[in-house]
Image: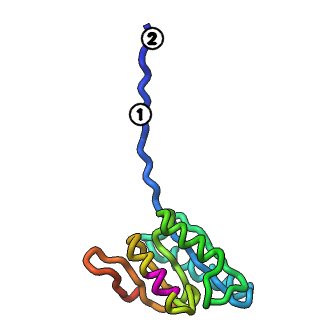
Amino acid sequence: MKGKISTLRRKTTLIPKLGMYIRSATGDQDSLQRQEKSLKAFIKRRPDLRKRDFEIYVDECQSGFKPGLEFLRLQKDIRDGRVNVILVTHMDRLSRSISEILKIFHLLKSKRAELVCTGEEVEIVRWPSFPLAIRGLK
C-alpha cells in the first residue's frame, strides 16, 4: 500500500520593496550618482528600511514636467504592490508638475504607501486615521 504524501506549502508573503527614484533633466551622471549615494546612505541610517530590498528607477535626460518611462514603471509597481515606499532626494526629483505630484499622492494614499523626500527633511506618510500626513525626518 502506497502512503499518501502530503505537501505542506508555506504561504509566502511578498514584502514590497523600496523604490528609489532618481531623475536628471540633463542626464548629468554626477547628479544621478549623488542622488543614488544619498538615498543609499539614508537607507543605511534607518533601521526600519535597512534590511528591505530596493529597486532603483532612473530617468536620465527626463524633464520633470512629464513622467518618464521609469517613473511610469515605478507607479505600476506601486499599483501592483511590489513597492510601498518611494525614496527621492527632493520633491522636484519626483516631478515638477503639481498635477503629477497630486496623482502620485493619490496613488500612495490608495495603496497605503509612503513617500520619503530625504533632502526636504519631511516624510509624507499614510496614516490609518488621516488620508495623508507630513512629518519631520529628524
Q: Note whether residue 26 is visible.
A: yes
> Quadrant where the N terminus lies?
top left
Determine whether 69 is above or below 7 in the image. Answer: below
Q: Note whether residue 51 is visible.
A: no
Please name the amino acid that badge 2 sits on. Answer: Lys
**Quick one: SS at disc 2?**
loop
In magenta stretch: residue 102: yes
Region in magenta: 100-105
Query: Badge 2 local density, few (<14 within 10 Å), some, or many (20+)?
Result: few
Query: Badge 1 local density, few (<14 within 10 Å), some, or many (20+)?
Result: few
Residue at (50% x, 92% y) in the render: 98
Residue at (48% x, 80% y) in the render: 104
Magenta part, dominant SS = helix
Residue at (42% x, 73% y) in the render: 113
Which is nearer the N-term, disc 1 or disc 2? 2
**Quick one: SS at disc 1?**
loop
Residue 3 is left or right of residue 93, and the answer is left
The x and y percentages for residue 76 are 54, 68
Q: In this figure, which residue is indicated by the disc labeled 2? A: 2
The x and y percentages for residue 49 are 46, 70
The x and y percentages for residue 43 are 51, 75
In magenta stretch: residue 36: no
Q: In this figure, which residue is indicated by the disc labeled 1? A: 8
Residue at (68% x, 83% y) in the render: 32
Q: Give the Cα distance between marks 1 and 2.
A: 19 Å
Out of 16 and 39, give the one closest to the viewer. Answer: 16
Please name the amino acid that badge 1 sits on. Answer: Leu
Residue 127 is left or right of residue 120, and the answer is left
The x and y percentages for residue 89 are 55, 86
